[in-house]
Image (cartoon, helix red, strand yellow):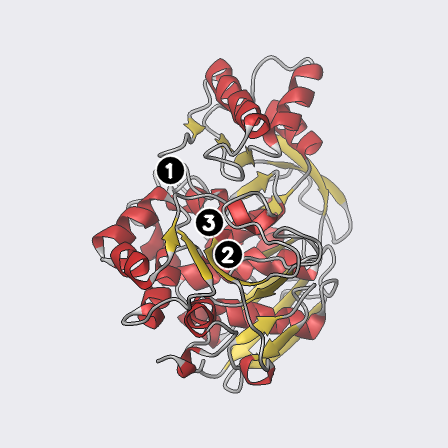
Amino acid sequence: MGRTIVEKILSAHTEKDDFKIGDIINVRVDFAFANDITAPLAIKYFKESGAKEVFDRKKIGLIPDHFAPNKDIKSAEQCKLLREFAQEQGIENYFEVGKMGVEHALLPEKGLVLPGDVVVGADSHTDTSGALGAFAIGVGSTDLAAIMALGEVWLKVPPTIKFIYSGKLNKWVSGKDLILYTISKIGVDGANYQVIEFSGEVIKRLSMDNRFTMCNMAVEAGAKTAIIEPDQITLEYLQGRATRPYQLYKSDPEASYEKVIEFEVSKIEPQVAFPHLPENAKPISEVGYIKIDQSIIGSCTNGRIEDLRIAAEVLKGQQVHPEVRLIIIPATQDIYLQALREGLIDLFVSAGAAVSTPTCGPCLGGYMGILAKGERAISTTNRNFVGRMGHPESEVYLASPAVAAASAVAGRIVSPEEVK
């Protein structure tokens, strides 16, 4: 019987080659990481376990990105814990302010996660790296403590749902719209503890930035992770990034899936997910009149250079609405520099936007854009739960950079077609 790409990756990382779906297996880890929220607890339990050294100082990353640059004393203390532990253990992949970025954008950019890897992060959006053809899963801090000590993780082998996308995307429709549309069809629990394998002619034509976006939000459908078979676009992205060998895997034609779901994309419009769940997505033509107070473009979902270019295309020659705060956050320092070289930062500031150093900041209601009672934001982030970005009586609408930029100009949620 044939195997899926995930089954092949797991087989290459475990001693139990005859496993089946639902079996518990131990899996060797190629890279493990945590951030300034999840690492302190992992470090605490690592030390309490009696472990003296991490399993491999080259295979662990510590990325202070959620509340860094530090917003208060507590966040400063959390980041100090990471800094000191990295120094104690000789961890090479510690990224300080000025060099750091949002973890799920930074690690692929630095070539630290690669095709065929088993990647484990103490953050739910670790599935982002599945866009490279890696098996990338999020875990809790206590699990990460054990992984840092042992270099392996135990897990139940998940089944896979295959999604096949056919047709041609309309203008302004991106990977963000595809994943919001997908979640709206299957629901936030539609792929519970299953792998989502994105495939089809539409996926093959997507850029890496759009692939990262789709895999990033698979967890919002309850998925264990998401994955895309690596191809020439993947290999081009890895040029100049990968500094160690990696393995390309593909699913066998006769591989067995939990189910196969097909979407024809030619009629899909830009999507907007209404509060308070990502599954509440509607086409832009059905949104109606919704005034906004804030627009956020950034995060591990949509803070990459292509996202900023699309936002700039919409904002060129425009001014942000006087009653809207537009906050743009490049996901990494390299993306920030690239945007600077291309003149995008100048364009954003001239249009009336605030541009920040890389941070997760407003996505989780941390800082750099907290909402007050009754305020509404449109955001390119991945979650719009109650109170996610501030006051529990605020509202967050999820959309692509194109829609977020257009809405910042109009002062209400609109299609880019309305301002271009």
For label 3, the SS is loop
Q: CA distance from mark 2 to mark 1?
A: 26 Å
Q: From the top left corner, tell me how far across and down residue 290 is, in percent.
A: 58, 75
Mark 3 or mark 1, which has the lower sequence index? Answer: 3
Can residue 88 be seen?
yes
The residue that mark 2 highlights is: 301
Q: CA distance from mark 3 to mark 1?
A: 11 Å
Amino acid under disc 3: Pro
Question: Do tag 3 and tag 2 residues touch (Cβ < 8 Å)?
Answer: no
Question: Do tag 3 and tag 1 residues touch (Cβ < 8 Å)?
Answer: no
Q: Is residue 229 above or below residue 52?
A: below
The residue that mark 1 highlights is: 244
Can residue 231 be seen?
no
For label 1, the SS is loop
Q: Quadrant of the N terminus?
A: bottom right
- Pick the residue in front: 65 or 151: 65
For the point 54% across and 35% down, the residue is 33
Q: Quadrant of the C terminus?
A: bottom left
In the shown orientation, is residue 203 left or right of residue 346? right
In the shown orientation, is residue 189 left or right of residue 198? right
For the point 54% across and 30% down, the residue is 72
- Pick the residue in front: 263 or 82: 82
Nearer to us: label 3 or label 2: 2
- Categorize mark 3 by other alpha carbons within 10 Å: few (<14), some (14-19), many (20+): many
Q: From the top left corner, tell me how far across and down residue 317 is, in percent.
A: 27, 72
Amino acid under disc 2: Thr
The residue that mark 3 highlights is: 115
